[in-house]
């Protein structure tokens, strides 16, 4: 598949919006529709879109962290959110909340959602990047815009 | 230590270890160390939990502070804690054995994280007091085992894994349907509350039908007749460390779940569920397993069929359903997990030294490796029920229970199957360990062509010797193990202690429905 100018331009606009939206979904999640899982999926699809527009090499670079590290830290953060109550004498997995000045509520369920978010992003991207390594012709191989790799026929 | 902490740690330790192992995915040594620490930690915690149960009775913990019938509870009674300890022993043994046995590629693709996630699923299944939560732990276990069984991507593994995955998905479907029907009938999934409510259900026929759904689901997981064929088709394909872990533990989680639901929940129509269905299934499982083994020529396939046949003995104890028979079932599980995992570990060393898992190619191991031969004989004779090894005591208790209960047919089957087990173990002994097999295929593989003893192979001997030592301990100190099994059987025969430990109110035992009052319900809600 060759690089599409339209897709690249659209991706440049859409990807930041999608990531912002995914964070919004995650934070909204505890009381309304949304949550870490769906937020993570939206965020992962942002990176998937980026990979389709620019190739997985660029997408990996844009993410900075290895997706598997994201998975591990996601589960780790979720576990920590379950362990925090133990230190204040509450039972394992109890949701603890505190209100910051200005009426913002913070609690361990948010931490849990962040963990889920990171896990879903990492997990989805591992799968997507792995598909690319297996040569699925969904992703462009060439980073130069507008060129067609000589080996593959135009899509 | 705090009781709640002891109940949580068997779950927290493997999960934390999985996270750390994934973070250190490029440093195999660190991963192996984390794995060993986590498995040993689970063993230590389980022993602590046993001490606590000895002192204070059944422990339960309401996760997140949500009280019993509404939230998910973790419960540790004698059966749970016995299972925890024995699986942690296998966990430690496999953690050591895996260091030389698992190749760099499999480690790179996440052997250690998934090993710990599998342990998490197993421990969760033993500890949960909630039927749906049990389903979730089964899924955790299954998904990790799916990965472990295909890790390495060899053709055999994929062929075995397809059968394993498909049949286990069917099993999950039955489990989920059963859980849905239970919830629709009883309005709760908390096992202690179900134990009360299911007895009050008017249409007891429906409860029996539901119990058969669970029989099919757990029967697949435990590899009961006629749903066992996935096991010998898949267990011989992954590396020895993985198949030893599977062989020791996975089917036994199914047996555990079966004992749990058929002692706690479904005791309304024992004449049908236990004395008819379970009894027949147990007998047929024993017979088909042992006959299947006789036709095999692969070290691990012989052992795999024997898992099936041995599961029959455990279910036999459950089917007779007297306190003595339950003691026999629990004793049998303890003995079997140690012995069976050990035999698979031995097969891995035999493969390393003799170059193959095939009994047609292996021969003369005794001449060059008498130590291994002795370490094979201990679990093999124990499996066959040779006195005075642990399998003999387990079978003796079961046979005595069967005769006392008048179930002569199943006792006769059990004894006959024991003889055939002897035959299979002798076959492995003759073909793999004694020289001069007359098989023409063996000629191409000269016995003198042996692999040298490396450091790695020596390390593999350590867990094998330790497990053989434990088998001897169980044989010599059968009395204390019997006592432990007896205490567990007493709890299983009379579930009131379990129910009280979970629900915590004696008046609720008299009238289960009062607890569904609205004021109690709102008492459990903590709005953020």
Image (tube, coloured by chain):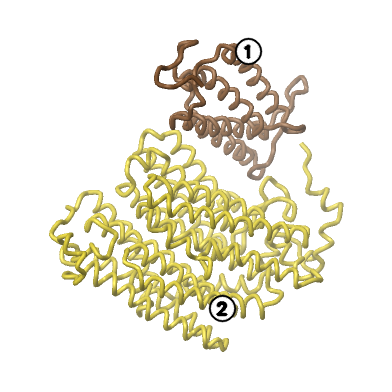
Chain colours: A brown, B yellow
Residue ranking furthest to the left: B448
The residue located at (49%, 10%) in the rendering is A145
Q: Secondary structure at mark 1?
A: helix
Q: Which of the 4 quarters of the picture holds residue B317?
A: bottom right
Q: In the drawing, does residue A141 fall left or right of residue B100?
A: right
| Image vertical order of residue A138 relative to residue B437, above or below | above
Chain on which label 2 sits: B
The residue located at (57%, 78%) in the rendering is B279
Q: Nearer the viewer, residue B29 or A96?
A: B29
Q: In the drawing, does residue B30 fall left or right of residue B505?
A: left
Could one spot residue B184 in this view of the protein? yes
Coordinates of residue B64 in the picture (x, y in percent): 68, 45
- Within 10 Å of disc 2 (Cα), the crowding (few <14, some 14-19, many 20+) is some
Q: Which of the 4 quarters of the picture holds residue B209?
A: bottom right
C-alpha span from label 1 to label 2? 67 Å
| Image vertical order of residue B68 relative to residue B438, above or below | above
Q: Which residue has dot 1 on it?
A: A13
Q: Which residue has dot 2 on it?
A: B280
Could one spot residue B55 in this view of the protein? no
Say which mark, if any, is on residue A144.
Answer: none
The residue located at (54%, 35%) in the rendering is A76
Coordinates of residue A123 in the picture (x, y in percent): 54, 34
Coordinates of residue B193 in the picture (x, y in percent): 73, 62
Residue ranking furthest to the right: B518
Q: Nearer the viewer, residue B290 or B522?
A: B290
Chain on which label 1 sits: A
Q: In the drawing, does residue B255 fall left or right of residue B214?
A: left
């Amino acid at each position: 598949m060759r690089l599409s100018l339209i897709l690249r331009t659209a991706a440049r606009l859409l990807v930041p919006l999608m990531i912002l939206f995914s964070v919004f979904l995650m934070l909204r999640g505890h009381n309304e529709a949304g949550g870490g899982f769906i937020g993570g999926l939206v965020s992962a699809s942002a990176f998937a879109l980026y990979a389709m527009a620019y190739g997985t090499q660029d997408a990996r670079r844009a993410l900075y962290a290895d997706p598997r590290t994201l998975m591990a830290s996601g589960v780790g953060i979720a576990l920590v959110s379950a362990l925090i109550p133990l230190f204040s004498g509450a039972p394992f997995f109890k949701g603890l909340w505190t209100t910051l000045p200005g009426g913002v509520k913070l609690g361990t369920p948010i931490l849990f959602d962040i963990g889920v978010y990171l896990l879903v992003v990492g997990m989805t991207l591992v799968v997507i990047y792995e598909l690319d390594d297996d040569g699925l012709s969904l992703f462009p191989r060439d980073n130069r815009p507008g060129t067609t790799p000589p080996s593959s026929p135009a899509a | 230590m705090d009781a709640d902490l002891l109940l949580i740690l068997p779950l927290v330790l493997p999960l934390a270890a999985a996270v750390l192992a994934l973070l250190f995915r490029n440093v195999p040594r660190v991963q192996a160390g984390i794995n060993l620490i986590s498995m040993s930690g689970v063993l230590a915690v389980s022993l602590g939990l046993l001490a606590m149960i000895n002192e204070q009775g059944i422990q339960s913990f309401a996760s997140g502070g949500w009280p019993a019938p509404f939230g998910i509870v973790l419960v540790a009674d004698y059966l749970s804690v016995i299972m925890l300890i024995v699986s942690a022993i296998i966990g430690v043994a496999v953690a050591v054995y895996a260091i030389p046995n698992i190749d760099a590629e499999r480690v790179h693709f996440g052997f250690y994280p998934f090993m710990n996630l599998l342990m998490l699923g197993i421990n969760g299944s033993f500890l949960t007091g909630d039927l749906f939560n049990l389903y979730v732990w089964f899924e955790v276990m299954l998904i990790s085992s799916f990965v472990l069984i295909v890790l390495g991507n060899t053709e055999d593994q994929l062929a075995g894994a397809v059968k394993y995955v498909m049949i286990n998905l069917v099993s999950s479907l039955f489990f989920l349907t059963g859980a849905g029907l239970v919830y629709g009938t009883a309005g709760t999934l908390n096992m202690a509350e179900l134990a009360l409510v299911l007895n009050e259900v008017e249409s007891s026929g429906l409860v029996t039908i539901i119990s058969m759904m669970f029989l099919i689901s757990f029967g697949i997981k435990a590899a009961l007749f006629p749903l066992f064929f996935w096991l010998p088709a898949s267990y011989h394909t992954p590396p020895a460390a993985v198949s030893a872990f599977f062989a020791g533990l996975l089917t036994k989680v199914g047996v555990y779940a079966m004992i749990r639901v058929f002692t706690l929940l479904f005791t309304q129509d024992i004449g049908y569920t236990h004395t008819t269905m379970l009894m027949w299934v147990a007998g047929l499982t024993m017979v088909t397993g042992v006959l299947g083994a006789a036709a095999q020529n692969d070290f691990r396939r012989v052992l795999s069929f024997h898992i099936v046949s041995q599961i029959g003995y455990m279910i036999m104890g459950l089917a007779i359903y007297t306190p003595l028979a339950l003691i026999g079932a629990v004793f049998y599980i303890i003995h079997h997990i140690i012995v069976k995992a050990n035999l698979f570990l031995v097969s891995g060393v035999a493969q390393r030294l003799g170059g193959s898992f095939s009994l047609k190619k292996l021969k003369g191991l005794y001449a060059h490796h008498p130590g291994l031969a002795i370490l094979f004989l201990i679990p093999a004779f124990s499996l066959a029920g040779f006195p005075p090894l642990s399998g003999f005591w387990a079978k003796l208790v079961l046979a005595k229970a069967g005769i006392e209960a008048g179930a002569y047919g199943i006792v006769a089957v059990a004894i006959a199957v024991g003889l055939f087990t002897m035959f299979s173990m002798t076959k492995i002994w003759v073909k793999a360990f004694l020289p001069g097999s007359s098989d023409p295929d063996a000629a191409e593989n000269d016995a003198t062509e042996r692999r040298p003893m490396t450091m790695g192979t020596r390390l593999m001997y350590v867990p094998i010797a330790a497990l053989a030592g434990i088998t001897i301990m169980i044989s010599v100190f059968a009395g204390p193990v019997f006592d432990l099994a007896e205490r567990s059987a007493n709890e299983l025969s009379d579930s009131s202690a379990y129910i009280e430990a979970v629900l915590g109110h004696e008046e609720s035992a008299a009238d289960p429905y009062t607890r569904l009052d609205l004021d109690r319900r709102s008492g459990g809600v903590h709005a953020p």
